[in-house]
Image (spheres, rainbow, N blue to C red):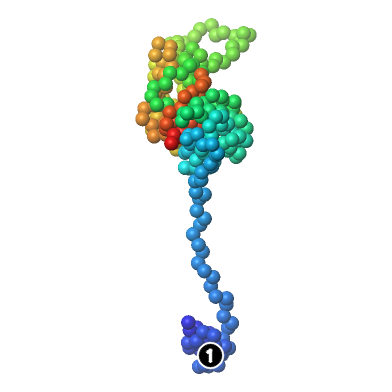
Amino acid sequence: MAASCPNCGAGVPAGFKFCGHCGHTMPAAGPPPGPPPGPPPAAAPPRNYGRTRSSGVQLVVLRGPLPEGSTFDLQSGRNVIGRNADVSFPNDTALDDRHMVLECHGGGAQITEIQGASGAFRRNRGAMRIPSGDTVFAGEQYLVMRKGSDAPKDPIDPNAEVPPETFGTPLPPPQLHITQLLQGGLPGRVASTDKNTLTIGRENCDLSFPQDRFMSGRHLRLENNNGELTVVDVGSLNGTFSRVSDMPVELAAGDEIMVGSVLFRVDFS
């Protein structure tokens, strides 16, 4: 490639030290340009964390510290899930070292133990009856569901003066009460109603979380039916999860389980 002489402007072939028109010394050529930058490194692909004596039960990661689609082949018998266990997620600080136990026998799987303080949650397949005070997971929120009669009450100072007169209409007793749990178990947002239904979602609900990317516009509702609490998912994309209790819990193909910050699906071969 020819270069232009800085003195007279004439073209000088590449590699020539002097201009053939005016004799001007040409500047030294710089190093050749390097190759163009390559594409940025790709995200880590999903991988299979195989086990010996596979039971035919597989966990598929849907959300969490590993790439989506990563799999764990469970062995026959006892499988411990946790930060330092048979199925390990060492970087998940929301998990205990030995958080949950899955038992695999005869092509099936059961949750038989939950040792982690934060528990485990299974995606609801329909309306789910829950005890007052239980915790439900939806979007990225942990929500404590209570009957109004079980709502936390501020302590009353027995030495406080009582006003001689009270103005206004007394409020009806609440029927439902929901408390958002923040990191560390601290209470966050609260919703209470004297009606028998309370709605939760990303927008235009009794309790809305507009910044929650995993929450649907209308996600779920809590019902009080004659003192019995029922959680109903109203067609959300990412589902509503109830705390696992009353073990052992038999798992079905396609069940989704949330432990710590890990969401996985149970598959059977």
- Is 168 drawn above or below residue 86 in the view shown? above
- Is 232 drawn above or below residue 73 in the view shown? above
Residue at position x 48%, y 34% from top? Answer: 57
Residue at position x 57%, y 80% from top? Answer: 29
Q: Is residue 218 left or right of residue 130?
A: left
Q: Nearer the viewer, residue 150 or 79?
A: 79
Q: Is residue 239 left or right of residue 29?
A: left
Q: Amino acid at mark 1?
A: Cys
Residue 244, x across and y down, in percent: 50, 24
Local packing at callout 1 (Cα closer than 10 Å; few below 14, some 14-19, many 20+) is many
Q: Is residue 117 left or right of residue 251?
A: right
Q: Please name the residue that numbered disc 1 is placed on.
A: 19
Q: Nearer the viewer, residue 85 or 237?
A: 85
- Is residue 255 shown to the viewer in this render? yes
The quadrant of the picture occupied by the C terminus is top left
- Is residue 185 shown to the viewer in this render? no
Residue 223, x across and y down, in percent: 40, 18
Residue at position x 55%, y 9% from top? Answer: 163
Quarter where residue 31 is shown: bottom right
Label 1 residue SS: loop
- Count the labels in the image: 1
Q: Nearer the viewer, residue 234 or 129?
A: 129
Residue 84, x across and y down, in percent: 62, 35
Residue 233, x across and y down, in percent: 39, 26
Quarter where residue 116 is shown: top right
